[in-house]
Image: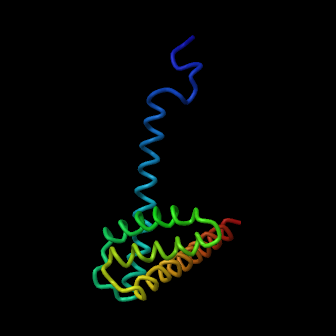
């Protein structure tokens, strides 16, 4: 058989590329989520908000929320509380500001998605 035939995607270079691409996508997603949390934290007036701390809070809060969400019935509520606790700890703030930063993050994401949807919708309409 010719070289590379019969192995499909299991060639050594392909698996390494998939792993590197996955790590790159994870870092980009973490940066974007961190930016949204950073904007939410700045909107509620958290003084210690930096993009680096926001990325740490997103990573730690996401992991903790995922672990706690496994618990039946109240897992989703414990997950939210865990995420807010991580924001509180990372930004060194109180519970109210941490909760408001989490909530503002969601609002900023929704507004951004709506704006992008309008832009894409208008550009699609212009293409017709």
Residue sitting at the far right: 128
Q: Nearer the viewer, residue 57 or 121?
A: 57
Q: Is residue 71 left or right of residue 45?
A: right
Which quadrant, please, contains the N terminus? top right
Rendered view: 90 above or below 60: below
Q: Is residue 48 left or right of residue 120?
A: left
Query: In the rendering, at what x and y percent does residue 64 appear?
Result: 46, 65
Q: Residue at x 59, y 19 (%)?
A: 6
Query: In the rendering, at what x and y percent does residue 57 appear?
Result: 38, 69
Which quadrant, please, contains the C terminus? bottom right
Q: Nearer the viewer, residue 87 or 116?
A: 87
Picture quarter containing residue 126?
Answer: bottom right
Q: Nearer the viewer, residue 8 or 127?
A: 8
Q: Residue at x 64, y 73 (%)?
A: 122
Q: Residue at x 35, y 66 (%)?
A: 56
Which coloring applies here? rainbow
Rendered view: 68 above or below 44: above
Q: Is residue 34 left or right of residue 67?
A: left
Picture quarter containing residue 89?
Answer: bottom left
Residue sitting at the far top: 1
Q: Residue at x 46, y 83 (%)?
A: 99
Picture quarter containing residue 71?
Answer: bottom right
Query: In the rendering, at what x and y percent does residue 27 appear?
Result: 40, 56
Rendered view: 119 above or below 100: above
């Amino acid at each position: 058989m010719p070289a590379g035939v019969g192995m499909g995607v299991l060639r050594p270079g392909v698996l390494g590329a998939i792993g590197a691409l996955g790590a790159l996508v994870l870092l980009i997603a973490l940066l974007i989520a961190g930016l949204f949390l950073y904007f939410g934290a700045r909107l509620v007036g958290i003084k210690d908000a930096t993009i680096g701390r926001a990325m740490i809070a997103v990573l730690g809060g996401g992991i903790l929320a995922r672990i706690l969400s496994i618990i039946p019935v109240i897992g989703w509520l414990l997950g939210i509380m865990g995420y807010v606790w991580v924001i509180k700890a990372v930004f060194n703030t109180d519970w109210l500001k941490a909760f408001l930063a989490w909530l503002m993050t969601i609002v900023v994401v929704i507004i951004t998605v709506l704006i992008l949807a309008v832009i894409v919708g208008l550009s699609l309409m212009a293409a017709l």
